[in-house]
Image (tube, rainbow, N blue to C red):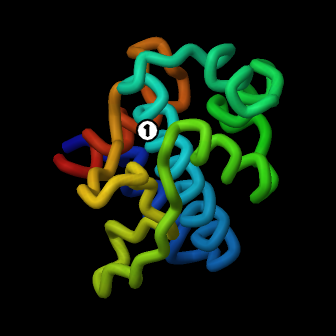
Amino acid sequence: MSSEKSIRDLIEEEKQSDPEFAKQYEEYRREYKLIAQLIGARKEKGLSQSELAESINMSQQVVSRIETLSHSPSLANFLKLVDGLGMELKLAPKDPIGEHFVPGVVRPKRSKSVTYGGALPASHKPLKAYEKNQAMQEK
């Protein structure tokens, strides 16, 4: 019998033993989900980072840093991105279970509500790590 633990198990153990780690992990996970929704919306609209950046008077480098999570955007810049995609940010109550909590739901500025959550390029490194973790959690 193998004594190897999955990444999910190790993360869960760390979250149980270290409340600060658990807090940081959840904050990062929520941020990643929001950024992933923005990237998915941009891709669905067929916009490049440069095209989106130009439409909101922002540099492509700033958009890239936000999308790769190497830079946390200010609220003003985040809202510029949302607006540039023709979307709006809405607050929703927390999921009582807490597993599917997203602090804001990015939706189109139309009466029909759609939540975006994919359409990232396969080469997107944070996406690969996230998908790997999601697949491990489903096992």
Q: Residue at x 48, y 57 (%)?
A: 11
In the picture, measured across the screen, residue 81 lies left or right of residue 85, that is right
Q: Quadrant of the N terminus?
A: top left
> Is residue 121 shown left or right of residue 19?
left
At x 59%, y 54%, the residue is: 31
- The percent position of residue 4, horizontal first and vertical second, equals 35, 43
| Residue 108, percent from left and from top | 39, 49
Q: Nearer the viewer, residue 11 or 63?
A: 63
Residue neighbourhood size for the residue with mark 1, other residues' Cα within 10 Å, grouped as few (<14), some (14–19), many (≥20): some
**Can you say whether 71 is above or below 105 in the image?**
above
Q: Amino acid at mark 1?
A: Tyr
Tell me which corner region of the image, top left, top right, bottom left or bottom right, holds residue 18: bottom right
124 lies above or below 112: above
Out of 1 and 81, give the one closest to the viewer.
81
Image point 81% across, 29% down: which residue? 58
Can residue 4 be seen? no
> Is residue 103 shown to the viewer in this render?
yes
Residue ID for mark 1: 130
Q: Give the vertical position of 95 relative to 14 (above or below).
A: below
Could you tell me residue 46's position as x and y percent? Answer: 42, 17
* Residue closest to the eye, 48 or 25: 48
Secondary structure category for the residue under label 1 = helix
| Above or below: residue 30 compared with residue 59 | below
On the image, the x and y values in percent for residue 129 come to 47, 32
Residue located 34% across and 44% down the image: 116
